[in-house]
Amino acid sequence: MRKLNKMKWIILGLLSLSLALAACAPSVPPTPSEAEIAQQVAATQQAKATQNSVETLVALVTQLSNQPTWTPQPPCPACPTQVVPTAQTTASPTDGVTEPTVAAPTEAPGAKCFQFDFLGDVNYPPGTVIKPGTVFDKTWTIKNTGTCKWTRDYDLVLAGGDAFGTNKRGDIPREVLPGETIDVTIYDMSAPMTEGTYYSYWMLAAPDGARIGYGPNQQWGLGIQLIVSSQ
């Protein structure tokens, strides 16, 4: 009987020791399935792609922040008189507006024979707002400050900018003696149908083809600046 009890306690002791060792043994993680492995790989790739996108965006922002700033410039000088190029113009591919090509103006024969001063705009001063398609006449006041008489063979000719539907030429209505003042007009001009700001520059042309403007070096033309708006 004592031997049986002793054996019983030995068995209980061994069983307790086995349970204690099993509890202390390190657990073995389960082997992930193929679907779980694929999901983990996809998550890792997505995280890496996101990191690359963020790094690229940071680099782009840094590059743009180092670019020099640009301040837009006005399309026309603040002065109401515009510097004028020659009569050679280039047609715009979008709205038909011609842009002046910068070049030296043609010299008139005689230092003081052929010249004039601009005295003012009779109508449509620079910055006038006009509705699309409006037909108008533009008039300036000028003075013959040269020593030669102007005849009716003298003309106003387009030197640059928009022709406003004209044939690029206007007449001097009468003879103008040295020192006389006259109003000169381009008739039947038509505002463009497209809204925007438009410019036009005109010079005085002699019968022999010489043309002049006014101001320093006779390089400024009689100007038109219109803002075409339906408002």
Image: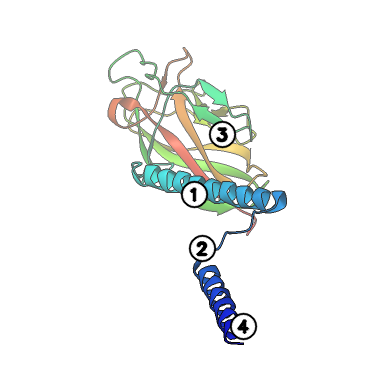
Image coordinates of residue 198 in percent, x first then y, are: 54, 41
Would you name the residue on which mark 1 appears?
51
Image coordinates of residue 4 in percent, x first then y, are: 62, 83
**Kind of residue at badge 1:** Gln
Q: Is residue 18 left or right of residue 132?
A: left
Image quarter (top left, top right, bottom left or bottom right) of the C terminus: bottom right
Q: Earlier in the sequence, mark 2 or mark 4?
A: 4
Label disc, if present, on residue 199 of the rendered structure: none
Would you name the residue on which mark 2 appears?
26
Which residue occupies 62% across, 52% down? 40
Image coordinates of residue 112 in percent, x first then y, are: 28, 20
Which residue occupies 48% across, 31% down? 202
**Kind of residue at badge 4:** Leu
Task: Give the Cα distance between marks 3 and 1.
Answer: 55 Å
Q: Nearer the viewer, mark 3 or mark 4?
A: 4
Q: Earlier in the sequence, mark 1 or mark 4?
A: 4
Q: Earlier in the sequence, mark 3 or mark 1?
A: 1
Q: Nearer the viewer, mark 2 or mark 4?
A: 4
Q: Residues within 10 Å of mark 2 (few under 14, many from 20)?
A: few
Pick whichever, 7 or 211, lies toward us. 7
Would you name the residue on which mark 4 appears?
4
Which residue occupies 28% across, 17% down? 111
Pick whichever, 23 or 74, lies toward us. 23
